[in-house]
Image (tube, rainbow, N blue to C red):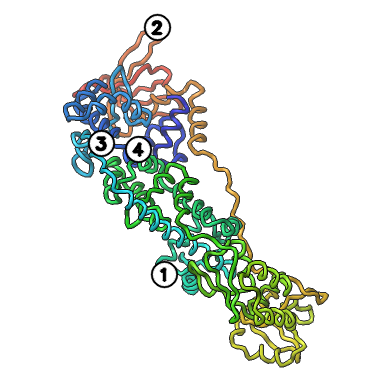
Amino acid sequence: MSRDSLATALHSREFEPSGVRDLFDLAEAVLTPDSVDHAVGRLDRRRLAVLAAAVELAASGGTTVSAVHGELMRHAASAELSDAAGELLDALTELMLVVPVDHGIHVPAAVTARVAPRLGADLPTAAELATPAPPVLVSGDDVDRSLIDRRAAETAYATVAATAEVLAALGVQPARELAKGGLALPDSKRLAEASGVTLEALPRLFQRAEEAGLVVREGAYWLESEQGAAWSLESSEGRWRHLAACWRDRIPELLRELVARRSESLTASTLRDDVRWFYPAGGRWLDEGLERLIGEAEALGLAVTGEPAPTTLLVLDGELEQASARLAAHFPAQVEQIYLQHDLSIVSPGPLEPALDARLRGFADVEGRDLASTYRVSAASVNRGLAVGETAESILAFLDDISLTGIPQPLAYLVAEAAAKFGSLRVALAGEADAPARAVVHSDDEQLVRTLTVDQTLSSIGLRQAGPDRLLSRFAPEVVFWALSDARYPVAAEDAEGNIIRLSRHHLATAPAPTPKSDPIEALLDLVFAEGEDGATEQAWLARQLEAAARSKETLTVTVRMPGGDTADYLLAPASVANGRLRARDRKADIERTLPLSAIAAVTPAPAGT
């Protein structure tokens, strides 16, 4: 085999490259049961049928392409399959499951040992494998397909919206990962409530966000990633397209290609049966692939009650733009204007455009997320916006620009009053004289300071009074600031000179840059081909055979080159091979002989009965 074809074949196997030192180790590695099972498990029905026929014929000796063709015909295979026997045997040769030898076909004993016992047990018989494919079901009517499109769009939109809410919640407060795995229960409840999904459904939703790179773990905490922040600003169609692409990329290529070329009229139960029919030896990889293909597809609107949606085949075939456009045609239209109410609530008549939604959340709390979303403005939410750089003027200008009802007087008054009070309570870095405290909280309003000391919601930051207008905490100023902000106090952060500074709570995690991975197969081939370049491969093969005979106490016929150019055969029982020499017992002369390996021309099994 060429190096490239060998590399391709080795990629179809499962073995530990680090244990391979030379070509002989490699030959042993690809013939282990696990390695053979890995390759056989990924054979489609046609190739497996040909392999089964070859295995049956090999039981009575060698075989040929024409014999395999005849065996398939005997099993009533279709002409298409039997006529392709030579082509399919070539494919099996490329996978090192059969070996062409002297115009015939040799099936390695290790392959026969793994395939023959399974035929008729956990695998179909050779005759059953040769059976033509069942007919594909004919499609239903167009009305049903349209209904599936609409229902798929509803589910897909709900998943996209729920994922966006998880990211928004992580932006406010990261989620802690337990040492044993999984999110801490308080964080799970918080994220489930924010996203509107059940506690049981949250892990799958969160896992999908992780696979898509939208959330990243830093130490013991999960945060929104930079990619997640960019995703949140995309349209619903763009968000879905990204999730669908990640779903597709994690489906095994063999399965993806098979389903992509099948009729979209297949139902889920038929699809599962159909796929398993095509890959009868498929095991765990097939089960996991089908679970993702059908189970995960539901959440993305790629299947409805187990039946693939029309967009599924488009996604599997790589037509993501076409698929997302088809699905998004049934998404609720995004809006760019809102209604401001006198009760300080804000109503969006539809899904608000992502960039507008993100800014509105900066100074308003989300009260309800549905096709018509509601927000509420409060003194605390305005204070939160002021802390990250908004002003009363910028808030009112933004609202005026997107409002369909103008700005109600109560809302304008609330924003102005919150801005006037902003900074009446301040947090700064504690000085050396206040050590070990790290943050100082001060205000000219001594009554407000006393209120902080008795507020039980602030017990976690351990405030202690250090004067009528000062409090100290052992936590960092940022931690104290956000604790006071969450408790709805008009707090501002300041630097050492007393100037108000803007703090950003929304810390984005940077996904680790992918490190280029070296191909272990290429490194392995570098090693084994280098080992064979010194001309010692033939001698090494002789040494391997002699060592194996010594271990199993076998007797061999060893052909030795004599000084005059002739050869002589010895019946030897090898004892050891070392330093390029063989030490063995001569069975006929009953003496011990020591021979240089370079003098050995050939090694064959001893005649029967010796």
Q: Is residue 124 above or below residue 59?
A: below
Q: Is residue 178 left or right of residue 33?
A: right
| Distance CA(mark 3)–CA(mark 1) | 50 Å
Q: Is residue 481 above or below residue 242?
A: below
Who is closer to the viewer here, 48 or 245? 245
Residue 201 picture quarter = bottom left
Q: Earlier in the sequence, mark 3 or mark 1?
A: 3
Q: Is residue 165 left or right of residue 355?
A: left
Real-space Cα separation, disc 3 to disc 2, in angstroms: 45 Å
Image quarter of the C terminus: top left
Judging from the image, what secondary structure is the residue with disc 3 in?
A: helix
Q: Which mark is residue 39?
A: 4
Give the mark nearer the N terminus: 2 vs 4: 4
Q: Disc 1 vs disc 4: Cβ atoms closer than 8 Å?
A: no
Q: Which residue is mark 3?
A: 113
Q: Quadrant for residue 407, please give it.
A: bottom right
> In terms of depth relative to the viewer, which is nearer, 304 or 92?
304
Which structural element holds mark 4? helix
- Amino acid type assigned to the residue bearing label 2 in the image: Gly
Percent coordinates x, y for residue 355 in the rendering = 61, 61
- Amino acid type at mark 3: Ala
- Lower sequence index among marks 3 and 4: 4
Q: Residues within 10 Å of mark 1 (few under 14, many from 20)?
A: few
Q: CA distance from mark 1 to mark 4?
A: 41 Å
